[in-house]
Image: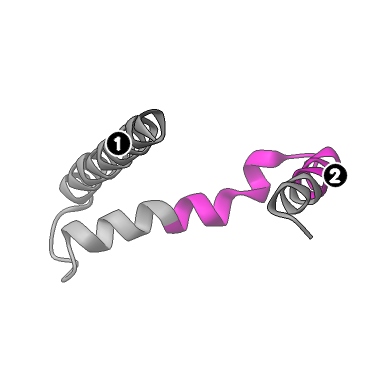
Amino acid sequence: MTASSRRLHAQAAAHTRWSREEDRQAATGKARAAFIDRFEREVDPEGVLPPQERARRAESAKKAYFARLALRSAAARKARRAA
């Protein structure tokens, strides 16, 4: 199977899965909570900060994560254009 056909199979499977889901937000709730927990553990591994401060710092850590992701994406696009 080629990469292109694997991609099409995966897209079809994903669309089928989401077409049968009544509440998308509930279906992804555990994953979203785990994603946020990752940043909370990153900024407060000992669990000593007050919840509001931990949440504030975790939000900043999440923004930094997405900013780094955007930089990597831009660099990849630039490299593809140059090639």
Pick whichever, 56 or 4, lies toward us: 4
Give coordinates of residue 61: x percent, y percent: 22, 46
- Whether the residues at callouts 2 and 1 have beta carbons within 8 Å, the answer is no
Asked whether, in this view, residue 43 is left or right of residue 28, the answer is left
Q: Earlier in the sequence, mark 2 or mark 1?
A: 2
The residue depicted at 53 percent of the width and 55 percent of the height is 31
The residue depicted at 69 percent of the width and 40 percent of the height is 24
User: Which quarter of the figure has residue 66?
Assistant: top left
Q: Main secondary structure of the magenta part?
A: helix
User: Which quarter of the figure has residue 42?
Assistant: bottom left
The residue depicted at 29 percent of the width and 44 percent of the height is 62
Q: Which stretch appears magenta?
A: 11-34
In the displayed image of the protein, which residue is found farthest to the front? 83
The residue depicted at 33 percent of the width and 30 percent of the height is 78
Residue at the spot of label 1:
75
Q: Is-magenta flag for residue 47?
A: no
Per the image, label 1 sits on a secondary structure element best described as helix
